[in-house]
Amino acid sequence: MTAPSAPQLRARKRRNAKDAIVMVTAYDEPGGRLAGAAGVDMILVGDSVGNVVMGHETTMRVTVSDMEHHVRAVASARPNAHIVGDMPWLSYHVDRADTVRNAAAIIRAGAHSVKLEGGANRLEAVRAILDAEIPVVGHIGLTPQSVLAFGGFKVQAKTKSAAEQLLDEALALQAAGIFAVVIEGVPSEVGSMITRALDIPTIGIGAGPDTDGQVLVWHDLLGLGNRAPAKFVRQYVDLNAVISGALSQYVADVRGASFPAEHETYPTPATFHEA
Ligand code: KIV
């Protein structure tokens, strides 16, 4: 089995729930390996790495070289999943040549496509990257790189006119040639309306049940975050508790002299004490 290509995913407009595109974020080799083995279609090496791995408040401190580093780690797992590398803030708000150079760095690190945030204001960047033969995923709605401009992480498209504007942006991105679009933080009805209107697959996060696929952040899904998850998150396991328990046990075992045990040590060779 090989990772699905951009054209194969482009053709995966949902017919029914069984065909839904499954995407999850990952940031390192174990993440890529486990996500691939679980059968996800797409792994997003998201700039959410800035929040969940690097501990920053926003994604705006993430650089292209951070993204290259994490894409390289995920790609080293060679998962049977399409790897999308996020373009960080200010890597595509620059001139055409720098935009393409930054997208290429993420592809050379091992991604199969790149994702960038924004609508009509990013069409030039999308076209430049596509011109360099690099497939692009869009990202609209509550775009985290706009958090300072939005004045916080706020659900978007809450009025009819804002929803219609978002739809126009999605249609413009589709016309420019993106092969899929992430829709984040909008009312379910807006997720549904945009999904019905587009020919390309939509992948929702906090956009309701009707998008063509879903994406969740690794740390949210697995209970590894350092704050209460957002309303749209389904947490499948509490790894904070599992890992804390294991580490506390390790501390107790070392201090209680029960680790290492005999079977966890190298025996002294019989010849060791011979002169
Ligand atoms: O960076 C990221 O993880 C993302 C998802 C929230 C879609 O962009």
Image (cartoon, helix red, strand yellow):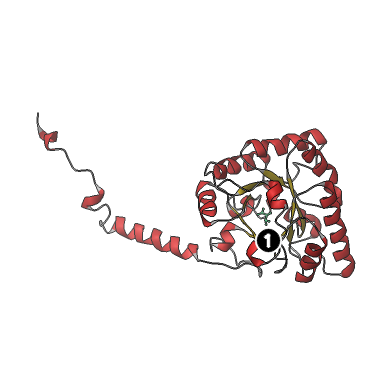
Which quarter of the picture shows residue 194?
bottom right
62 over 162 or under it: above or below: above
Report x, y in % for residue 88. 71, 45
Toward the right, the furthest residue is: 161
Query: Label 1 crowding class (10 Å Cα cut-off): few <14, some 14-19, many 20+?
Result: many
7 over 160 or under it: above or below: above
Report x, y in % for residue 239. 49, 62
Q: If the image is split into quadrants, where does the C terminus sit?
A: top left
Q: Nearer the viewer, residue 99 or 78?
A: 78
The reply, left or right, for residue 30 in relation to residue 152 is left
Please name the amino acid that badge 1 sits on.
Gly
158 over 58 or under it: above or below: below
Q: Quadrant of ligand 1?
A: bottom right
User: Circle 1 is placed at which residue position?
Assistant: 213
Report x, y in % for residue 84. 66, 47
Which quarter of the picture shows residue 108?
top right
The reply, left or right, for residue 78 in relation to residue 132 is left
Q: Please tell me whether mark 1 sits on a helix, a strand or a loop.
A: strand
Q: Is mark 1 within 8 Å of ligand 1?
A: no
